[in-house]
Each structure stands twice: as C-alpha cells, then as structure tokens.
Amino acid sequence: MPLVADATEKTGQTANGEPLGDLRRLVEPDLKKVNATILERMQSPVALIPQLAGHIIAAGGKRLRPILTLAAARLCGYEGERHIGLAACVEFIHTATLLHDDVVDDSHLRRGLETANAVWGNKASVLVGDFLFSRAFQIMVADGSLKVLKILSDASAEIAEGEVGQLLTANNTATDETAYMDVICAKTAVLFAAAAQVGGVVADEPEERELALRSFGMNLGIAFQLVDDVLDYSAEQAALGKTVGDDFREGKITLPIVLAFAQGDEAEKAFWRRCLEDLEQTDQDITEAIRLMRKYRALDEAMDRARSYADKARQALAPFPDRPEKTALLDLAEFTVARRF
Amino acid sequence: MPLVADATEKTGQTANGEPLGDLRRLVEPDLKKVNATILERMQSPVALIPQLAGHIIAAGGKRLRPILTLAAARLCGYEGERHIGLAACVEFIHTATLLHDDVVDDSHLRRGLETANAVWGNKASVLVGDFLFSRAFQIMVADGSLKVLKILSDASAEIAEGEVGQLLTANNTATDETAYMDVICAKTAVLFAAAAQVGGVVADEPEERELALRSFGMNLGIAFQLVDDVLDYSAEQAALGKTVGDDFREGKITLPIVLAFAQGDEAEKAFWRRCLEDLEQTDQDITEAIRLMRKYRALDEAMDRARSYADKARQALAPFPDRPEKTALLDLAEFTVARRF
C-alpha cells in the first residue's frame, strides 16, 4: 500500500508550510498508530475499496481532526490507547464526507490531485464513502462507549444536515449571515467539536472539561471555515498557484458575499445575482467581486469574525493546566486565523 | 406530511397482491408505530430532508425488513417497545441504500414513481441518504444496545462492500456463481439477516435462537434476491406492465446470465459479451437472451436455488414454538419463491 506509506511520511512534514509543527511533533507517535489503524481498517476483500480509500486518505490531508482527538486526550493526561482508534474513526467520517462532497460538487481536483470520482467515477466514490462511514461505526462499537457513539452519530447527522443546507443556500443571494453560520457550524465545526470532545471522553474528564474541549473544537472549526471562505478570494492564494474564486464560480454563498451583498446598491445586487444565481459570469467578474468585497470591507470583516472565534477557542482551554499540548493547541487557534494561504 | 400518511395507509394493503397479508395483519399495530417513528425521526430543520426522505419512504415500499424485526421480536414473545425504533432504523438504513443506489444506477423510476434523484437531483439524494444513515445510528445509540449497534454497523459495512462488488461484476461476463452469491449476500441478504436477528436481541433470546433468526433472514434474503433477478426476465412481469430486461440493458450480471454464459458455445459467449460488456444491444437481443436462458434452463435452475434457500429459511425456524408469527414467516418464505411478479 505505497499510497498510504506516502501519507504517513507526509504527516511528518509541516504540511503546506503550516505551523502545525509543534502539535504534530507532540502527537507524532500516536499519529503513526492512527495511520496504521486507518490502513488496517480500510481493508476489504473488495479490492477497489482500499484502492479508492487509499487514494483520498493519502492525498495530503493534514489529519487535523484526528490530531485534535489525540492532542485533547493527551492534554487531559490520558495514557491509554483508545484515542488511536477513535481518531481513525474521526478521519474516516471526514473522508466519507469528502468523497461525497466531491461527487456532489462534481470536483475533479482536490489538493492538486485528481479526485477519487475523477479517477474511479461517482458510483464508486459514493459507495466507498458509505463503506468508510460504516467502518467508522464498527470501530466505535468495538471501542464500546455509547457516549462516543452518541457524539459522533450526532455529528454525522448534523454534517449531513449542513451539507443539504449548503445545497439550499447555493446560488441564493438572499442567504443571510445566520443561514451561513448554521451551514458552516454543521458542515465543518461540529466534527472539529466532536473530535476534540472525544479526546476528553476517553480521558474520563468531568463534563465541564469535556464540554470545554468541545467548545474549543467548535470555535476553532468555525474560525477555520471562515478563513477558508475568505482565502478563496485572496491574492496570496493565487500567488501560490491555487485557484481564486472557486466558490464564486460555483455560486457558493459565503460570508464575504453575504456582507458585500447586504451593503450593495441595486446595481451591485444585480451584479451578484447575475453571477451567483444565474451563474452568468465573465472572466472579469471575479475581479469586480473582489473590488466590491474590498469596498465594503467584507473580507476584513469576515477575518475579524474568524479572529473572534479563534479567541473563543483559546479561552475555552483556560480550565486546562499548562502542558505542551495546551500551548500547541493555543498556537493552532492563533495560526488558523493568521494563515494567508 | 401527506406523503407519509399515504404510505401508512398503503402498508395496510396487500401490497402488489403479495400474501404478506397474514404477517402484515399480525404486526399491524407495531407497524403503525414504526411508520410514526419514521415520520418523526426523518424530521430536520432543513426542510428538504423530510421532503425528499418522505418521497422515497412513501413510495410504496413493502416495509419487508422492518416487518422482519417486528415479527421476529413477537415470535420470541417480546412484549416491549424497543423493536419499534430498531425496525425504523432498519428501514432508514435500507432507504439510505436505495437513495444511493438510484444515484449510482442513474435510475429515474422506482416502483413506477420518479426517483428522488430524478426529482431533486443526485446531490440531494446522496446527502439525504447520509442523513438517514446517521439518523439510524442515532436511534440505535438511544436504544443503547452495543450488540444491536454491532449487528447493524457490520451489516452496513457489508452492504457497502456488496454494492462496490456489484460495480465490479457489472459488465463482466467472467463473473462466476461465487462472485454473484457474494454480492447478493452482502447487498441484500445481510440486512434481512440483521433485521430478523435484532428482533431476537431485543427479546433477549439465547444466542442459538438469535442466530436461528439471523439464518432465517439471511436465507430468505438470498431467495428474495435470486427471485428478483429471475423475474427481470419473466414474461409475467411484462404482462403486469413492468419492464423486462432492465438488468440486461444495464449489463448487470445475475445468476441466469452466469449459468447461461457458462454453458454457452463460443458464438453464444460472443453474444453475451457484446450485449453485456460492450453494451451493444438491439431490441431483439433481450428475446435472444431469454431464449438462451431457456435453452440452458438457467431461469429454472436459478429458481431451484431460490427454493432451496427458502427451504433453509423455513428450517431455521424449527426451534421456535408454533405461534401465528411463525406460520406467517414460514408462509412468507414460501411465497417469496412462489411469486411470479
């Protein structure tokens, strides 16, 4: 399985230049076990399953969500091994949603590589996603904690609700900030929250601390998604060879658009509707979109919100004693809103 | 939710003229509660979810799998209410796989009605399937039995494996009987098995009886799928206004084809390859396919196998005392292989 061996190597790097370095170094031995568990548990007598799953799992993901589980457990002084399997679960759930997302968005590239649906077709991607999702539940059942099962089945249902919600807000310029926040909480932040909370559950932390970890994950996840949505319009992204304006071209309604649209005059609102509802776009429209976002400080405003959620995430860790994991998680929250690419 | 109210009414009928009558009458009060639970638990603040889920759940399904759970529990003398929620779970898992199947097969009709993907698109069908699947696990978690969770998460993983396996056997005339049986066990019989077994688990039956129920479900499921695959080539089906040869047109390799292909001469093998691998078909080819199946008794042979599995299913119920549920389940196995449409 050379694909996954590659992935294991990649996780040792500072992926995409991000200073996950400290955090990754702290959890490195655990993360190696997580990668081994992922490799072992994605096997199936049906050879296409590990082939396709290996492709996406190896495709350079940062393993951010399982790292949250690992770091949260260690932050709580947990010395056992349960967090390994559960971190793999979290990654399987995430991977299943990515496979289905790429089908739903008809994406052909992810992190610069061909998507699984581009290589093996939509059918296989849908079904292997279903397999990984089921496999995640098998791992949880073997772990045996109904509390963990509740946290992650609740998260899965909310993720699906968020994804359907995103379908409904797409191409709809009437989407307001509340609808946008509902979608990103559900589709992104809830799994960050669950991943961190599970670390506290295996460590048998009192409820207050378990919920503090959940709050850290939730606020971090919101900040992460807000920044992701801003970066889709960032020039630095273009300088790094990434595409600018993918969300715009798809008519995805993110916070910068919500804010710029709300303050726009009638002509500007007509521009947004043509581009995002009718999807009638010229190559120059993305430049005009960014100009309007700057005019109304929509990107700055969205980054301000992101910073405020990152601060909340940091504050959530107040009850925990100073440990290297705490410092690394605080740094992660800070970096999430400092990254420019 | 008028759609689901319709469905509740339909379940009281002898659907498609099938003599599920006795069984359905026996579990009718429970089945009403299952339908109410389905209606309640498919709700979501995201309105498209109950809309789309209601469409497929109401589309005239026979509720065969939840009925197995209900009847198995009652056969064991179970007097509680846990089988209601778990029967709803089983139907949610089944519905999620149907939604994904219709996307994977690009189907536009199911039971004479437009499929959910035809009405709302593939994206929504994939995501609502994910939601129903997650919701099934939430219900199981609330029920609180790790044993049930294991049975149904194992079943879900196997179903996904079976569906991927089916992708791989499609258009492949080298598929042998073992590969075909693996696929139908996993994609169909495993959920029948799990549905029946769960009825025994809630009744706290000794393991031997629980496994007898599982064996009943498994063998019934195999018989059911074998018959389904034969009926795709049956003239009676045509007389009832259903389409003949859907599997053939898709290049799906089912047992009648496996058997006819294996016995065919080179010219006949070339015919099967052209039709099923290259999908180069004329309107007359289905007639020729049926002629070749008759020549080698492939349809009769497949029905013989189905009858043998139905017998095994009936034998599996031997340990159980005579009760109306037992008689009705024995009749169900008999009917499954007697139905001609």
Image (cartoon, coloured by chain):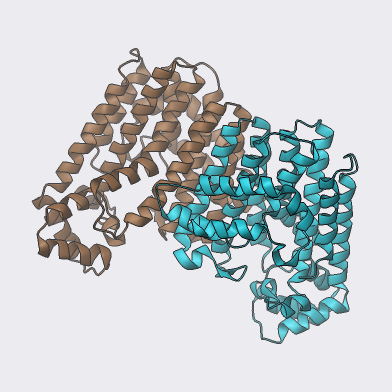
Chain colours: A cyan, B brown
Q: Which residue sits at x=42%, y=24%?
A: B71
Instruction: Report whether A259 appears left or right of A241.
Output: right
> Which residue occupies the foreground of this view, B137 or B29?
B137
The part of the image, by quadrant, that contains residue A73 is: top right
The correct choice, above or below, for B327 with respect to B54 in the image is above
User: Would you say residue B120 is visible in this rendering?
Assistant: no
Q: Does residue A174 appear to the left or right of B217 in the view shown?
A: right
Q: Residue at x 40, y 37 (%)?
A: B190
Find residue A145 and report its horizontal and vertical position in percent: 64, 31
| Relative horizontal placement of residue A110, taking residue B281 as reference (left or right) | right
Q: Which quadrant is the C terminus of chain A positioned in?
A: bottom right
Q: Vertically, is B314 above or below A62?
A: above
Q: Position of residue B13 (x, y in %)?
A: 39, 35
Q: Nearer the viewer, residue A286 or A278?
A: A286
Q: Which residue is depicted at the point 80% across and 82% down?
A: A267
- Which of the 4 image quarters holds residue A308? bottom right
Question: In terms of depth relative to the viewer, which is nearer, B6 or A334?
Answer: A334
Q: Is residue A224 visible?
A: yes
Viewer-side residue, A184 vs A7: A7
Residue A183 image position (x, y, % from top left) = 72, 56
Give the total of numbered labels: 0
Q: Is residue B324 left or right of residue A278?
A: left
Residue placed furthest toward the top:
B321
